[in-house]
Image: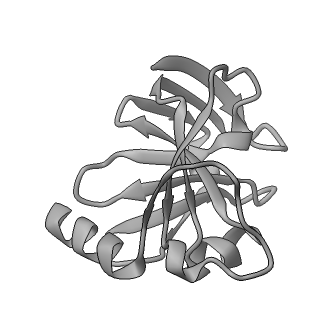
Amino acid sequence: MSYAETNCLCGAVKIIAEEVNPKFTVCHCQSCRTWGGAPFFAVKCGKKVKIEGRENVKMFESSSWASRGFCSQCGTHLFYKFKVTGEYNMPVGLFSSLEGLEMDMQYFSDARPSYYCFSNETKEMTTAEIMAYFSSEI
């Protein structure tokens, strides 16, 4: 776990994450690919997250278990927040100073389009597996 600070493109939102897990996940679901135009590469940041400029954060309830936050000024994708636990997943690319990153798991592997694949050997969870996993969290 490591401490990291970042901000959105325009600087209206600053994020301080006290516990960033360097083992990141990749989500291939349609929502993530629509949101960012590609799979969502996310680091788990837990609950110890401080957000300055919160008035510039727009929330979108994207599923029954999570909401997505983005800067209302510049559109930077800031986080994916779980409703029940309050934990944050944040785009790996937000944090330029993270070291020792390792792809650990791929979510919705059965939803991954045929036009890309990764050679990393990770655990993969299908839609059915991920739905069962998150429904047990709720």
In the rendered view, tell whether residue 33 sits above or below residue 119.
below
Residue shown at 62% from the left, 29% from the top: 101
Quarter of the figure with residue 32: bottom right
Q: 119 left or right of 129?
A: right
Residue shown at 49% from the left, 48% from the top: 89
Q: 110 left or right of 93?
A: left
Quadrant into which the N terminus falls: top left
Residue shown at 62% from the left, 77% from the top: 112
Residue 18 drawn at (x, y percent): 46, 21
* Between 27 and 63, the one nearer to me in the picture: 27
* Between 101 and 78, the one nearer to me in the picture: 101
Q: 12 left or right of 50?
A: right
Residue shown at 59% from the left, 71% from the top: 28
Quadrant into which the C terminus falls: bottom left
Residue 72 drawn at (x, y percent): 70, 60
Residue 105 drawn at (x, y percent): 48, 51
* Between 92 and 58, the one nearer to me in the picture: 92
In the rendered view, tell whether residue 26 sits above or below residue 126.
above
Identify the coloring.
Answer: one colour
* Between 100 and 72, the one nearer to me in the picture: 100
Picture mark count? 0
Residue 59 drawn at (x, y percent): 52, 65
